[in-house]
Amino acid sequence: MALSSKIKNNLQTLNLSGKRKKALSFLRKYINAHRNDSEAKLKFAWFLYHVTLDEEKGKKMRKHLIEAKKIYETVLKNKLTQDKLLIMNARICLAQIMAILGEKEAIKIARENFNSQKSVLMSNRLADVYWRLKNQHKALWWFKKSERLAGNKKVNLLMAKLALLNFYKHQSKKGLAEKYQKEVSKLM
């Protein structure tokens, strides 16, 4: 049984209203009743990943990230879904989680994602993997690649420039951060 559109809409509403824990709780119960629903498992892993990043630290964070990682790996390995968007999102999140856990294999997955869909988003996610793995030079290169791929599409430019703004802020490069802040402001 797949998630109904009503359940998907409710999950989206919970996510947008900042009630990710409530969505996570609902999905945990749903999965217990519908163990073969791979879409629900992927949604659960997504919410677990994001709630963990938002709220947890240390051993508990690591435990929950590993739980989400196992769900992604199981669904992808066993090809439990044919939905290309779900597969791509699972691969993106899996690479992010692996990078947070310090696993260099994340680079391979993120590169495969980019090679299968050369886009601002995939370039940005690959940059983020490098950044989380402490390779600032390659992270910057891929963030810049995102900017080049954005072309004139406003939403893509905004994504790319926000990522660079965030990167430069964290690198304490005030002048470059201010430059991108101005560019982002113009786009908004």
Image: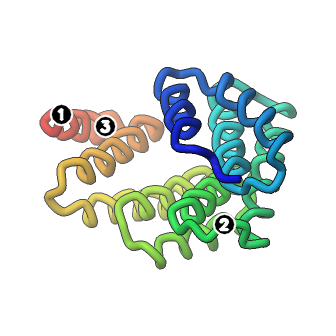
Q: Which residue shows up at 40% across the image and 58% down it?
A: 121
Q: Secondary structure at mark 2?
A: loop
In the figure, residue 152 lies in which quadrant?
A: bottom left
| Badge number at residue 81 | 2
Separation of disc 2 and disc 3 at Cα? Answer: 41 Å
Crowding around mark 3 (Cα neighbors within 10 Å: few <14, some 14 to 19, many 20+) is many
Decide which of 36, 182 is in the foreground and name it: 36
Return the disc, 1 or 3, that comes first in the chain's sequence: 3
Picture coordinates of residue 75, whole percent (x, y)? 74, 63
Give the left or right position of residue 40, taking residue 152 as reference.
right
Q: Secondary structure at mark 3?
A: helix
Crowding around mark 1 (Cα neighbors within 10 Å: few <14, some 14 to 19, many 20+) is few
- Mark 2 residue type: Thr
Which-is-in-front pick, marks 2 and 3? 2
Q: Are marks 1 and 3 in contact (CB under 8 Å)?
A: no
Q: Which residue shows up at 68% across the image and 41% down it?
A: 49
Q: Which residue is mark 3?
A: 177
- Mark 1 residue type: Met
| Badge number at residue 111 | none
In the figure, residue 38 lies in which quadrant?
A: bottom right
Which-is-in-front pick, marks 2 and 1? 2
Vertical relation: 123 (above or below) 117 = above
Q: Which residue is mark 1?
A: 188
Separation of disc 2 and disc 1 at Cα? Answer: 37 Å
Separation of disc 1 and disc 3 at Cα? Answer: 16 Å
Vertical relation: 151 (above or below) 27 = below
